[in-house]
Amino acid sequence: MTNSNAESAEVTTSESRPSNFLQDIIAEDVRTKRFGDAIVQTRFPPEPNGYLHIGHAKAIFLDFGLAAEFGGKTNLRFDDTNPQKEETEYVESIKTDVHWLGFEWDKLCYASDYFGQLYEWALQLVKNGKAYVDDLSADEIRKHRGTLTEPGTNSPYRDRAIEESLDLFQRMKSGEFPDGSRVLRAKIDMASPNLNMRDPVMYRILHATHHRTGDAWCIYPMYDFAHGQSDSIERVTHSMCTLEFTDHQPLYKWFIAQLGIFPSQQIEFDRLNLTYTLLSKRKLLQLVQENRVNGWDDPRMPTLSGLRRRGFTPEAIRAFCGAIGASRTNGTTDVEMLEHFQRDDLNHRARRAMAVLHPLKLVIDNYPEGKEETVEVANNPEDPSAGTRQVPFSRELYIEHDDFREVPPPKYYRLSPGKEVRLRNAYFVTAKSVVKDAQGNVVEVHCTYDPASRGGNSPDGRKVKSTIHWVSAAHAISAEIRLYDKLFTKTDPNDFPEGGDIFDNLNPNSLEVLTDAKLEPSLASAKLENRFQFERVGYFCLDPDSGADKLIFNRTLALKDSWAKIEKKAGG
Ligand code: ATP
Ligand code: MG
């Protein structure tokens, strides 16, 4: 069992203390009645082009959490303005994930519900001389755009008559023109230092079927002409989004001001970045499409569905989100911090069980043949109310291969010839001899036990330096165990040499499947929602691939393994 992860919660960002700047802004707006008597209204606006990931959990936590804190409401709004990449499957998964995280939206909205209103508003801007139809190609528009240091140049169509733009825009809508032949642009300022203000495109022609509006539309609004207006329609007071939208804020305000509609306020916060983790739906989609992982809910994925399948809990994810807070500068958080919150949660809730991942037979020579007994074991030492259970014990057991060494290295206190250890909750045993296969591998260990040490303590006060777990061979159930490690080998998966790609950083050993683990019999009745700590091994949960005849457990996280560290340091 390796556990290469650091064990403590260490945070790399100095900004990672929960910051109150979003709370402060909202509190001040409430105090000054900036939005009159309107309640605090927020929204979570995912584009349904993939499954939600842990970065979205941060946004959800802020959108829903802050609104609730001020007695407000949060809408779930699908930003479905791009018919080519969006699917109903994603809409459904997003709803499931938001609920799973523990949040309830007020209204369920779709930007596509507003296509009619957005079109009316676009007409209004054309009529007011604030928007025009441009016949330039996308390429030409790009060339006219200028750079950060050079102003752009006006399109030759910029000053065409309002009537002409109006006519062309209506014909764009009615389907007269092919994709890409014309766009509707806002008429702002081609010399603006902010590139987003250089006559941004508002509508494009796209003869594509939309997941909700079907073929009703062949022109679609751009994000910038949909997002702020959707906020305004829903009377969103605080529209929180990530920092990359900061440069879009002037445009967000410009459209709202030109249209004279409800003045929603955009506020930006830092995107969650996690070490060793890819947080981009586009790239995660690539992992799925190229079969680098087994679907969006592969337990190695940072998606909420992947984390859920892996055994992460909404409580832990919320606690993590609360701890990272929000700030105004981007940073990177150690993935170990997320794991720390998960371990902490599981340590309190997980039922203990004994499971042997790499079985080695242990035979107690002086234990009567055919005898069986049960030992009473606490279900969770952290929680006495979880009760106890009876675990069968007999003459032949399985122990972990790694808990026996024929020639023990220094500081190795587990079983070795002549050494005595405690079998957890059961007896003291002393190793006597081994049986080897033709290759010289130890396949069986013989020992003797001290019947007076029942329960795990010797009446003469004798101490042992180690306690190991075990499963009675006759009673054990077999299971498949899936061990997960980091999906990427680099702290920043995007760090690859020129000519390479992100997949060069994939960890070839991120999944290890053990096909014949031995589990205590109580685990036969495990349910998907149960969380277990396999003693000394890690946290586990049942995988949905399990069937009546085949149990499969996922390792959520390893426990801290100080031995692995010592061995590593020693160069082992
Ligand atoms: P991705 O690049 O993964 O597709 P996105 O920003 O395009 O992310 P959206 O569906 O547009 O994804 O995101 C919905 C909301 O979630 C937005 O408000 C966005 O700012 C927020 N969000 C997305 N990724 C993160 C992240 N890593 N940390 C915090 N918030 C995020
Ligand atoms: Mg996006």
Image (cartoon, grey):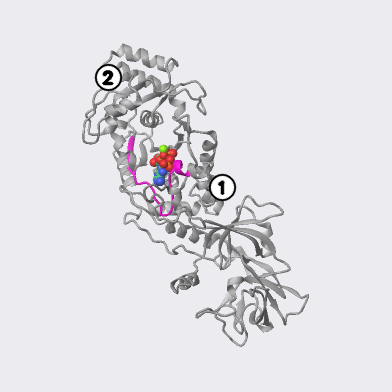
- Which residue shows up at 30% across the image and 42% down it? 28
Q: Quadrant of residue 176?
A: top left
Badge 2: few (under 14), some or many (20 or more) residues near its Cα, within 10 Å? some
- Side (left or right) of 254 relative to 439: left
Q: Is residue 72 magenta?
A: no
Give the structural element (helix, strand or loop) at label 1: loop
Q: Which mark is residue 294?
A: 1
Residue 72 position (above or below residue 387): above
Q: Nearer the viewer, residue 70 or 346?
A: 346
Q: Which mark is residue 164?
A: none
**Looking at the picture, how far across and down is residue 171, in whole percent?**
41, 14
Residue 166 position (above or below residue 445): above
**Residue stretch rendered in magenta on the structure:** 265-284
- Which residue shows up at 39% across the image and 47% down it? 499
Q: Which residue is identified by label 2?
A: 158
Hey, what amino acid is under mark 1?
Answer: Asn
Residue 63 position (above or below residue 216): below
Outermost residue toward the right in this view: 370
Q: Quadrant of residue 201?
A: top left
